[in-house]
Image (spheres, rainbow, N blue to C red):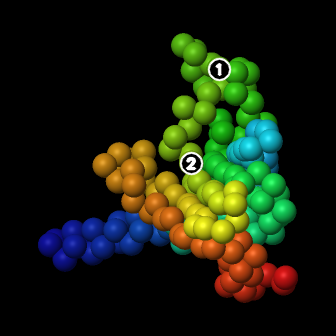
């Protein structure tokens, strides 16, 4: 009897692990897609918000996919023009979709109490924030920073984990090195 219970617990444990490994909605065989849902550009600021469809769950893979996307779509000229910029990336979910528009009602209904689309409802859906701060004189420290929001909603005390700030002096050199790192043709 004792052997049967141990054997049954082993089977249940293996089943739980297999279910956990395949329970997310990430499909490594399909491409990750980015949808811009908001953009704010003035003469001094450039800020964009994206929803990421088919985003990985592994933090290093999230970083790789988003940094590669940034290198392919964020031009050096644009960063220099605005003195840097920022991008925020959300995981696509049932309510945080590529059609998200703050202030518009959710469809399907999110809440009968307040059904207005609001970024504050989606802190747990944030994947990563990236940004550049370029020295306007062009002769001093500049910064590339990113923040992976891994487990942020469940572990508020870890709100500064996975936050990095990299100092550089030449944006062209940084871009060249990063493109080489990810195998992107210059």
Image-based side of 57 in relation to 8, left or right: right
Extreme residue toward the left, this view: 2
Question: Quarter holding the N terminus?
Answer: bottom left
User: Dot 2 surroundings within 10 Å: few (below 14), some, or many (20 or more)?
Assistant: many
Q: Which mark is residue 116?
A: 1
State the quadrant of the C terminus.
bottom right
Quarter of the view holding residue 182: bottom right
For the residue pair 50 and 114, the one nearer the viewer reads as 50
- Which image quadrant is residue 131 in? bottom right
Q: Position of residue 151 (x, y in %)?
A: 42, 54
Q: Give the structural element (helix, strand or loop) at label 1.
A: loop
Marks 1 and 2 sit apart, C-alpha to C-alpha, by 19 Å
Relative placement, left or right, of 127 versus 43 is: left
Residue drawn at (51%, 65%) of the image? 165
Residue 14 coordinates in the image, percent (x, y): 39, 72
Q: Position of residue 155 (x, y in %)?
A: 34, 49
How packed mark 1 is, by other alpha carbons closer than 10 Å (few <14, some 14-19, many 20 or more), is some
Residue under label 2, please give it: 126
Is residue 64 in view from this perspective?
no
Q: Can residue 1 be seen at all in this image of the molecule?
A: yes
Left/right of residue 51 with respect to residue 124 in the rendered view: right
For this orientation, the residue located farthest to the top is: 113
Q: Nearer the viewer, residue 67 or 1?
A: 67
Tell me what residue is drawn at x 70 percent, y 21 percent: 103
Q: Residue at x 69, y 74 (%)?
A: 170
């Amino acid at each position: 009897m004792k052997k049967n219970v141990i054997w049954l617990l082993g089977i249940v444990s293996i089943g739980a692990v297999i279910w956990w490994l395949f329970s997310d909605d990430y499909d490594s065989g399909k491409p990750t897609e980015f949808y811009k849902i908001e953009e704010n550009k003035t003469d001094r600021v450039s800020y964009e918000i994206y929803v990421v469809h088919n985003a990985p769950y592994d933090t290093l893979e999230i970083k790789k996919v988003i940094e590669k996307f940034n290198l392919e779509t964020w031009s050096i000229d644009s960063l220099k023009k605005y003195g840097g910029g920022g991008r925020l990336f959300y995981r696509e979910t049932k309510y945080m979709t590529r059609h998200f528009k703050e202030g518009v009602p959710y469809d399907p209904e999110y809440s009968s109490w307040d059904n207005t689309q609001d970024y504050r409802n989606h802190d747990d859906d944030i994947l990563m924030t990236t940004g550049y701060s370029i020295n306007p004189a062009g002769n001093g420290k500049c910064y590339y920073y990113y923040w992976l929001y891994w487990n942020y909603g469940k572990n508020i005390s870890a709100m500064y984990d996975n936050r990095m700030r990299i100092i550089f002096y030449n944006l062209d050199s940084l871009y060249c090195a990063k493109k080489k790192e990810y195998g992107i043709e210059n």
